[in-house]
Image: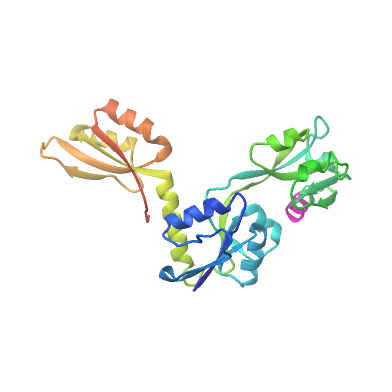
Amino acid sequence: MLRIAIPNKGSLAESAADMLAEAGYAGRRDQRDLHVIDERNGVEFFYLRPRDIATYVGSGALDVGITGRDLLLDSQSEAVEIADLSFGASTFRFAGPAQTFSAPSDLDGKRVATSYPVLVGNFLARHGVTVKLIPLDGAVESAVRLGVADAVADVVSTGSTLRKAGLEIFGPVLLESTAVLISRDASIAGIQTLQRRLEGVLVAQQFVLMDYDCPREILDAACAIAPGIESPTVSPLHDPNWVAVRVMVPRADRNDVMDKLYDLGARAILVSAIHAARL
């Protein structure tokens, strides 16, 4: 069986579980379960702390896992990213007391608190900055107020938590992180199937099917507006001067595309959700 590591809690856990369910896998029913066997799909799920997943997968104890890119890079694991799963997006930034720091170089000789000492240490080393790293397990925004550090480096979604602690973000983005699929050996049986299924879920989330009728004389112009993944499907109608067209359109663009097609002369424009896909 394919052994898969899944976050047991935190911001990644619910989205990972939902994505796997959409991909056809049976997950846990009780949040206290740490091990679930999906006989139908030939997989075992192990629910672990997100920070530990890269270690388990990198050691070969588990075959594949879902975790954050930031956690993978900080783990120094032998696992590698094999797919971006496009959820749990965040950035990694420096923050300090207002109007105190403006660039990473200002941190030279200072104390920096973080839950990601390897990631931060590597970044500062590349920029020739020497600091004293203060490793903390979460809630690093309190470190400056309590006198433990001069600045912090942490995952940022909106920045509101840092602002409430009297800190302001400065310097460049250290890392843009999302949830990723990781493995030490992507050739292990079953991983490619898992990856294709998850990619199919992403397609279903990012695209819609659009059907419309249009006069033959405007078909080329209509296809230029919505070219699809490879090419639109065109079918004849009873009226020889009209055709029916089906095409995949980015979900975010659907209303703009509908407006342009209608203005061009297309009619009966319908949009349908995609529940699964293989491209």
Q: Is residue 18 magenta?
A: no
Identify which residue, 249 or 201, lies in the foreground: 201
Which secondary structure is most common in the magenta stretch? helix
Percent x, y of residue 146:
86, 41
In the image, is 97 to the left or to the right of 70? right
- Viewer-nearest residue: 264 or 94: 94
Residue range corresponding to the magenta coloring:
116-123
Return the residue found at the far top.
263
Quadrant where the C terminus lies?
Answer: bottom left
Q: Is residue 220 left or right of residue 127?
A: left
Q: Is residue 119 in the magenta section?
A: yes
In this view, 204 is above or below 59: above
Query: Could you tell whether 254 is left or right of 268 in the image?
Result: right
Position of 247 relative to 79 (above/below): above
**Number of disc labels:** 0
Residue beneath the point at 56% across and 69% down: 63
**Tell me, what colour scheme is on the image?**
rainbow
Residue 193, picture quadrant? bottom left
Residue 6 placement (x, y as % from top left): 57, 60
Q: Nearer the viewer, residue 267 or 147?
A: 147
Of residue 259 and residue 159, the one placed in the foreground of this image is: 159
Q: Position of residue 203 (x, y in %)?
A: 41, 49
In percent of width and height, residue 1 lies at: 49, 74
Vertical comparison of 80 with 166: above or below: below
Q: Residue drawn at (28%, 44%), measured in percent from left and top?
A: 232
The answer to whether residue 121 is left or right of residue 53 is: right
Residue 239, image quadrant? top left
The residue under the point 67% across, 62% down is 52
Residue at 24%, 28% (x, y): give it. 265
